[in-house]
Amino acid sequence: MDNLYFQPEIETMERSSLETLQLKRLKESIGTALRSPFYSTRLGKLGITPDSIRTLGDLRRLPFTTKEDLRSNYPFGLVAVPADRVVRLHSSSGTTGNPTVICHSQHDLECWAGRVARCLYMVGLRNTDVFQNTSGYGMFTGGLGFQYGAELLGALTVPAAAGNTVRQIKFIRDFGTTAIHAIPSYAFRLYEVMREMGISPRTDTRLTTLVIGAEPHTEAQRRKIEEAFGVKAYNSFGMSEMSGPGVAFECPCQNGLHLWEDCYIMEIIDPETLEPLPDGEVGELVLTTLDREAMPLIRYRTRDLTRIIPGECPCGRTHRRIDRIKGRSDDMFIVKGVNIFPMQIEKILMQFRELGTNYLITVDTVNSNDEVMVEVELGDLFTDDYSQLQRLTRDITRQLKDEILVTPKVRLVDRGTLPQETGKAVRVKDLRKNK
Ligand code: DLL
């Protein structure tokens, strides 16, 4: 039973067979989508039928689907099956207007759990593992998504949910947790509290694996997490619109995330011109679902920026890899005409050993001038020597300016000063939006 979730016939499939499978499933997906009010109008108007798709290239003739489409057809306008087949919905936390809703049939939930089990198996988890999930349960898909995936794998799955760090640590020790799923900012929090309690993750726990994802993070941040816990931390990518976690995941080679191409067709487009980009170039990820029946999505614009990593992976899996997410096109902020992504700033900050991992970027207009302020917490090894702090501030400012081409104000603050979110970290506050 142990290797049920390694499916070499799918994961290492010849590209040509994989593409044949994709084409077959794409036609089916379009046939299903046409049963929803939204796509029957949108695609019907263009005369699209499953038979009009003869090659994978024909997908490019179809219109994109956007988050706005989901919002304006809220809640059920994209549902393609009768109501009695829908068994669950997840919804995003829309701050303004309608949230987005994704509906699932029993079949969809089974496919999703299978994908997550496949990902966990890939990084070495088995039915003897104890998997503790620190995601919020509820509408956020990191909770139930990992719960059902890890259970399907046969692991003892601990639905610890978000927050209450001291209790999390007690569970880790009492239940012999071997694997933790956490968003990267929470992994740091867990480690800090462990240290305050005098607990070493290396010697006082049975941890072997961390799964981190759901928010952008740099390679340097991943390395810091790995050093802190003394175990490998694997990057996990997904989004509620594509069911949740389990869309793309790192293998033990940790050189990109295999995107499961039997379940999704991926495209990378230039977000301005909407034209396809060649492998290796960074652009917006566009995904089409291939095995979802309650609510298929065709050419969904994710807004996530990444690239396809050219070449083959030494692990032998043939599903292509995406690079870690560089940010979202809607995360980008513009200061003095320069496009800036929070990940550019994080990349520089993480190079300074004196700094901790929590930071906040505030953009504001001061005397008609746009200014960027970067506040970052100090790591606890650092002294409070004033001249040393000044030198460090200067170094950070210079390196940031080289990277983002704007001179930011840098403020070093004590550990624990900046807000610590229980969910995904909020890295940018753009106060210009409120003016
Ligand atoms: O974050 C699903 C998920 C749960 C993924 C647990 C992984 C682990 P949403 O809340 O809909 O779903 O947010 C999706 O989060 O479009 C990306 O911008 C970002 N994101 C997700 N995974 C990563 C990652 C879940 N590994 C949005 N790296 C996506 C960077 C990520 N960004």
Image (tube, grey):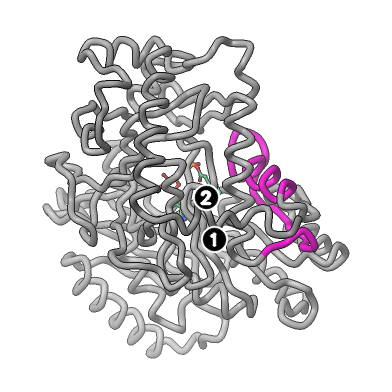
**Whether label 1 touches label 2, CB < 8 Å:** yes
Neighbor class of circle 1 (other Cα within 10 Å; few <14, some 14-19, many 20+) is many
Residue reaching furthest right?
174
Q: Is mark 2 within 8 Å of ligand 1?
A: yes
Tell me which corner region of the image, top left, top right, bottom left or bottom right, holds residue 184: bottom right
Boundaries of the magenta span: 125-152
Residue flagged by tag 2: what amino acid is it? Lys
The residue sitting at 25% across, 17% down in the picture is 48
Q: Which residue is mark 2?
A: 424
144 lies left or right of 271: right
**In magenta segment, residue 132:** yes
Q: Which residue is mark 1?
A: 185
Q: Quadrant of the C terminus?
A: top left
The residue sitting at 54% across, 46% down in the picture is 245
**In magenta segment, residue 207:** no
Tell me which corner region of the image, top left, top right, bottom left or bottom right, holds residue 323: bottom left
- CA–CA distance between discs 1 and 2? 7 Å
Above or below residue 46? Residue 93 is below
Above or below residue 114? Residue 400 is below
149 or 241: which is nearer to us?
149
- How many numbered callouts? 2
The residue sitting at 40% across, 69% down in the picture is 313
Tell me which corner region of the image, top left, top right, bottom left or bottom right, holds residue 55: top left
91 or 351: which is nearer to us?
91
Asked if residue 66 shows in the view, the reply is yes
- Element type at mark 1: helix
How far across and down, in percent of the image, does residue 214 sit?
50, 51
The residue sitting at 41% across, 64% down in the picture is 256
How far across and down, in percent of the image, does residue 109 sit?
62, 33
How far across and down, in percent of the image, does residue 101 sit?
50, 25
How far across and down, in percent of the image, does residue 324 sit?
39, 61
